[in-house]
Image (cartoon, rainbow, N blue to C red):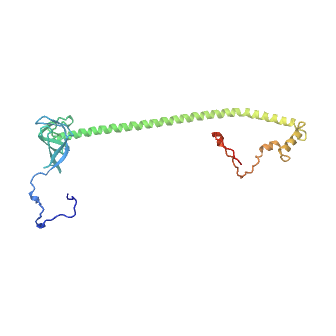
Amino acid sequence: MSERKVLSKYYPPDFDPSKLTRARKPKTDTPPGPKVQTVRLMAPFSMKCTSCGEYIYKGRKFNARKETTDEKYYSISIFRFYIRCTRCSGEITFKTDPRGMDYVCERGAKRNFEVWRQGVGGGGGGEGGKNETDEERLDRLEREMEERSAMEELEAKVVDAKQEMAIADALDEIRTRNARNERAAAAGAGTAGEEKEIDPVDEERRRVEMEDEERAKRAFQTESGERVRRIGEEGDGVEEEEESGLPEGVGMSDKAMMPPPQTVPEFRRVVKKKKDLGKALGIKRKPTLV
């Protein structure tokens, strides 16, 4: 069996490459008429076949022939499409309608009635649509402008109402804050007045307490100004001073105020004793002979 992919091919001895010519047809040989090409499309509207009565729904896919016609709407080309009925294979044709932004069914099928297209657009699909005159179009545009202006006025009113509500809410918040501040200021003034009334009583009480302290000090002092002590206070004080190790002239009250003595840190390594886990696990070691 010979190989498919070969680098060299067999040429017979009588091979003449000059006799090989590429068949090229001139452009003048192309048939005149509109350009036709095969495309894949979906049905742009629901229709009913006039031959067999088959209903074709919108969006059904077909292999159609697309034809560029000589008709134009301003500078927009109009295309014609040819499809076949799915039941009787009857030919159905429809073309584009740039004026009405829709399609027009020409022959082979009848477009189903659509309420929302009644009386709107030019040529809008067979029996359902009608051509608008200039006066009708002007009237329709005027009505649309009036409706649009009415909607704009309504939207402006809604925006104004929202702004007014926001301003009213802000004013209510400011009034509430001012009222709260006024109540706080009045309460502060009332407490200040009460403190002024209570101040003389507190001062009198403080003065009486100070006089009592002075009288107690004078009662327990001698004429020279020394404090009178009970018997045994001096000895106890000396013993406490000796036991505490404080210098002379430093009392116990001063000892409480003094900072604690500083301890010198030690940097000696401490060896921790290892735990014998054998006893916990129930392992018995044999005694050594040595």
Q: Residue at x 53, y 36 (%)?
A: 177
Q: Nearer the viewer, residue 17 or 196?
A: 17
Q: Is residue 100 visible?
A: no
Q: Nearer the viewer, residue 25 or 132?
A: 25
Q: Nearer the viewer, residue 226 or 113?
A: 113
Q: Quadrant of residue 19?
A: bottom left
Measured along the vertical axis of the image, is residue 230 above or below residue 249? Answer: above
Q: Residue at x 86, y 44 (%)?
A: 242
70 lies left or right of 222: left
Q: Quadrant of the N terminus?
A: bottom left
Residue 205, image x, y percentages: 76, 33
Q: Quadrant of residue 5?
A: bottom left
Residue 207, image x, y percentages: 78, 35
Q: Quadrant of residue 236?
A: top right
Residue 199, image x, y percentages: 71, 34
User: How many numbered marks, from 0 up?
Assistant: 0
Q: Is residue 146 visible?
A: yes
Q: Residue at x 89, y 37 (%)?
A: 232
Residue 157, image x, y percentages: 36, 37
Task: Residue at the far front: name it.
Answer: 289
155 lies left or right of 109: right
